[in-house]
Structures are given as structure tokens and as C-alpha cells.
Amino acid sequence: MRRVLVVDDAEINREVLSNILADDYAVDTASDGEEALDILQRNGTDTAAVLLDLYMPKMDGFAVINVLKDKGWLQNIPVLVITSEPATEIENHCLEMGASDFIHKPFEASVVRNRVRNVTELFVCKNKLEQKVEEQEEVLKKQYRIIEMQAEKLRESVPFNRLMMEYRSAIMEVETRLKILNEEFSQVYNRNPFESIKSRLKSPTSIYEKLALKGYPVTVESIREHLTDVAGLRVICSFPDDIYRLADLLIKQDEFILVCKKDYIRSPKNNGYRSLHLILDVPIFLSNEKKYVKAEVQFRTIAMDFWASLEHKLKYKKDVANTEEIEGQLRACADSIEMLDYQMQDIRNKIDRSTSSDMQVRGNA
């Protein structure tokens, strides 16, 4: 039988509660807080619940709750406060301290049994869930250690490092073509089509995790065949029409081959994500051969990129409160960003048309 501890300086209260609970629990009793703590020290986690009077000699119930909290026992042992006071302030204070429920005087047998049963069963479920979470965390830690070991083997592999060199070369090739286009635009149109380029090479750990998730072997051949985003570039543009103009020009570059195009600007993801993705076969020129290597190029406006970085923090940061509310706010922000991007683009077009008309008038004069 599970044990409960009844702590009350009134012997009649201890006897009544013991009789009510005797059929379902092994009942220990204590007449003050110090005696209660001695019993809990001996029984440890075998105690399923503590029924605790607040006002007692030597050590009152408030002090007992504080000790239980300091020792960490409140995480596993629920406390039901015995009280005859209907004062809301006292109950709120007890709940804030960590009490789970209340047993009111005079005692009603069925109410006492139900409250003790409900609280103890709730804590059993909570403790089992916490244990399950701890076990899963340990499994994940072991899996991560395995992934790190395998990733380290990849780092030390000569063929893998050769492949990473090829991906770096593809990134440099795309960056060079984009910078040339940017220079041309600045001369012809007196403005730049993009603000910045960011590039990254997928880490060995991320490569291993992605291949394992897809069920592919972790080999150089598998990386080359099944992963399209090892080499990644992000191009940040000022306006949406610059994204499409620049993407079209990049696709038309000599020997670049479009493998896949995903337009999340015209067809956003459910969470509000907007970006234009291109998967390209990029030619790289080595000492003895020309090869094609895949690279992913993402195009976003400044506002889209700011939104995506915030959404990424929410996605990968643990223990974020009000997640659903934040997701809803992010979706609303994504819609506002789309409107703002096109409004700013329209303003730019009006400025350009006005400038063009002004120059034409001056030319005629």
C-alpha cells in the first residue's frame, strides 16, 4: 500500500483522517512539523502524499512546505493543506508556495478520499512522464554522441574533404556571377539588385543527420546524389521584383543548369515563410576536369530575411512559452511584410518614373 503522512497537532484530526484513509493507504501521523520531517526523511519517496495542518507548535505548516521545497521533495510528494479557514488569501499563498490541494474541516470522508486519490494519481503520472522524458533525453544524447563520432570520421576522410572543396568552389562560382550582375546593374540602372550575399557549407554533423533521417548511407556518393543544399547561398534583395529579375538572370548564366525551383513568395508555407529557392547544377573548373556540383540559392527581401531569422529562433529554441500565440503573430507579420514589400516597390517605381520623366523633359529642352 502507498503511504500517506497526516500532520496535525490535534489528535482527533489525526485519528479521523487515519480512519478515512486506512482502507487505501498505510497512514503515518505526526503532531508537528519537526516530527513530520523526520518521518519523511526515513520514508523518502515512499510517501505518496502529505496532509498538512498550517498552525502547529515547534514548526508550523508553512515552514514545513518551505523545507520540502528547499529539499526538492515537493516535485515528487504532493501536499494537501488541512484548513478550516475559507480565506482566499491563505489558499493562494499556499498554492504559490507549492501546495497541491486542500482538505477542509469538518472532514467529509468521500471528499478526503477523492482529493487524496486524485492528487496522488496525478503525481504518479507526472513522475512517470518525467522519467520517460529523462530516458528519451538520454537516448537522444547517445544518438548525438554517435552522430558526432560519425561526423568526425567524415571530417578526417580525404574523399569527403575533396567533395567539400568542390562545394566551396561552387559557392565561389555563384558568388562571382552574382557580383558581376550586381556591377552591371549599378552601371546600367544606377542601382544594385541585391544588398548582400551570405553563404554557408553544411557541417559534417548536419550532413550525417540529414542522410540518416532520409535513410541513405553516409558516403561521398550518397551526399552528392541525395543532398542538394550542402552548398548554400542566401541573396538579400531590396524588392520582390529584383528577386525574380536576378533569379532569371542567374538561371540564364552560361552552363548553369536549373534543377529545381520553389517559389515560396507567391505560394508561402503555412507558417508564413516566403523565399525563392533555386537548386542549380554549377560548373566548377578543376586542374584536370570540369564538374557539375549542386548548390541551393535562396532569394529574400530584407524584411523576409529578418522574419525568417526570428522564426528560426522559435523553431529551434526550447522552452518557449506561448508558442502558438507567437506562431500566430509571426503569420500575421509575414502578411504585413508582403504588403510592405510591394508598397515600397510601388513607391520606388513612382520615383523611378518621375526621375525618368524629369530627364526626358530636360533633354527636350
Image (cartoon, rainbow, N blue to C red):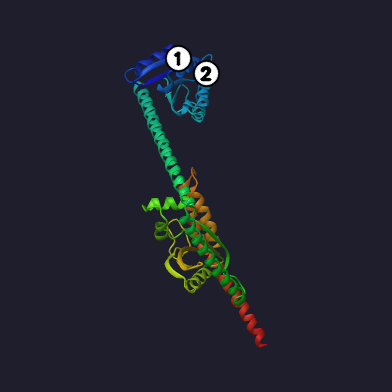
Q: Residue at x 37, y 23 (%)?
A: 112
User: Which quadrant does the C terminus fall into?
Assistant: bottom right
Q: Quadrant of residue 358?
A: bottom right
> SS at mark 1?
strand
Where residue 250 appears, as percent x and y from the top left, is 50, 71
> SS at mark 2?
loop
Q: Is residue 217 above or below residue 51?
A: below
Residue nearest the observer in this picture, 140 or 274: 140
Q: Is residue 94 above or below residue 219?
A: above
Q: Residue at x 46, y 48 (%)?
A: 153
Q: Amino acid at mark 2?
A: Asp
Where residue 170 appears, as percent x and y from the top left, is 50, 64
Marks counted in the figure total: 2
Residue 107 appears in the rendering? no
Q: Nearer the viewer, mark 2 or mark 1?
A: 1
On the image, numbered disc 2 is attached to which residue? 60
Residue nearest the observer in this picture, 357 or 242: 242
In the rendering, which numbered label is found on residue 30? 1
- Tags 2 and 1 touching, CB below 8 Å: no
In the rendering, which numbered label is found on residue 310? none
**The residue positioned farthest toward the top in the image shown:** 11
Where residue 12 appears, as percent x and y from the top left, is 41, 12
Q: Amino acid at mark 1?
A: Ala
Q: Quadrant of residue 81?
A: top left
**The residue positioned farthest toward the front in the image shown:** 288
User: Which quadrant does the N terminus fall into?
Assistant: top left
Residue nearest the observer in this picture, 282 or 102: 282
Q: Residues within 10 Å of mark 2 (few under 14, many from 20)?
A: some
Q: Quadrant of residue 126?
A: top left
Q: CA distance from mark 2 to mark 1?
A: 12 Å
Q: Is residue 261 above or below residue 143?
A: below
Q: Earlier in the sequence, mark 2 or mark 1?
A: 1
